[in-house]
Image (spheres, grey):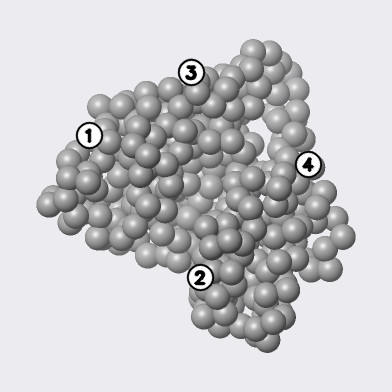
Amino acid sequence: MRGPLVECVPNFSEGRNPELVGALARAIVAAGGVKLLDVHSDPDHNRSVITFAGGPEAVLEAAVIGAGLAAERIDLRRHQGAHPRIGACDVLPFVPLVGVDLKECAGLARRAAQEIWRRFQVPAYLYEAAATRADRRDLAAIRRGQYERLRELVKTDPARRPDIGGPELHPTAGAVAVGARHILIAFNVELSGGDLGVARAIAARIRSSAGGLAGVKAMGVWLASCGRAQVSMNLTDWERTPPGRALEAVAAEAARLGAGIARAEVVGLAPRAALESLALSPFPVAGADNVLEDRLAAAFADQ
């Protein structure tokens, strides 16, 4: 593709209804000027990640339309899943790829947040590079308490109110966290022979905030569908900690605690160089061929 290229990776609070997830993907593409790169759904997390890319203005409009449809179709009062969330469209990150920088993506994020509020009355929190408050750069801080707690706190605690819109959350769609960041890799490892406590202990040891691996955010969750515990990670600095290194660390901690590794998965897309770190993994890894560069080349081959 000629000209600037931005990636957007909205996370929607729906992973069990393929028809609705498909409708979200179609609405995003129908906005025009963007290419769908990947759709990943997880019924245990009850969450879907849709990846698309295009020029900055086209991506902005497609992101707003996707968030609006999610607000119309997803009711958080009935939503249950293993992953923390505050909104129907839970997070909406803009990622610079070609000819655009993080500052420009932060501007897109703020404009998107304003439009989502104006059109759909869903308030927004701004995170990472788009944040206007230092205490909101970290997404986990924004999501503390999740939708159920946050919808009550915004009524009494000014420090927890949205950056744009509100002050109360949308009654069914909650709020959306809109941000700008560099490429992040979502990477999950399922344990064999370990319970939720083991997964949480491993997550606590490897996360960067506790002195573990650089650029790693981690939590332990239970997957009811397969009866396994999972270490769910976001690799925010994949050059320092690629998926292969994260998998090695989880395996070492699991062995120390008497557990093993059942499988791992890459959620969405990742740079080729990052996925190469998994080439010699002794464990099965789903999504190890989800190469971002290949999807982009195929999607924009005619441009």
Q: Amino acid at mark 2?
A: Val
Q: CA distance from mark 2 to mark 1?
A: 32 Å
In this rendering, which labeled residue sits more in front, label 4 or label 3?
4
Question: In the displayed structure, does residue 87 sit left or right of residue 139?
Answer: left
Q: CA distance from mark 2 to mark 3?
A: 37 Å
Farthest residue, direction top: 3
SS label for mark 2: strand
Q: Callout 1 environment at 10 Å: few (<14), some (14 to 19), or many (20+)? A: many
On the image, the x and y values in percent for residue 301 come to 75, 22
Of callouts 2 and 3, the N-terminal one: 3
SS label for mark 1: loop
Question: In the displayed structure, does residue 61 sit left or right of residue 176?
Answer: right
On the image, the x and y values in percent for residue 123 come to 26, 38
State the residue position of label 2.
Answer: 221
Query: What's the residue at 53%, 36% (across, down)?
Result: 181
On the image, the x and y values in percent for residue 260 come to 71, 79
State the residue position of label 4.
Answer: 272
Question: In this view of the protein, which residue sits in the foreground, 210 or 8?
Answer: 210
Q: Amino acid at mark 3?
A: Glu
Question: In the displayed structure, does residue 272 sit left or right of residue 265?
Answer: right
Of callouts 1 and 3, the N-terminal one: 3
Q: CA distance from mark 4 to mark 2?
A: 28 Å
State the residue position of label 3.
Answer: 57
**Image position of 60 with respect to 72: above or below:** above
The reply to whether residue 87 is visible in this rendering is yes
In this rendering, which labeled residue sits more in front, label 1 or label 3?
1
SS label for mark 4: helix
Q: CA distance from mark 4 to mark 3?
A: 27 Å
Q: Quadrant of residue 278?
A: bottom right
Q: CA distance from mark 1 to mark 4?
A: 39 Å
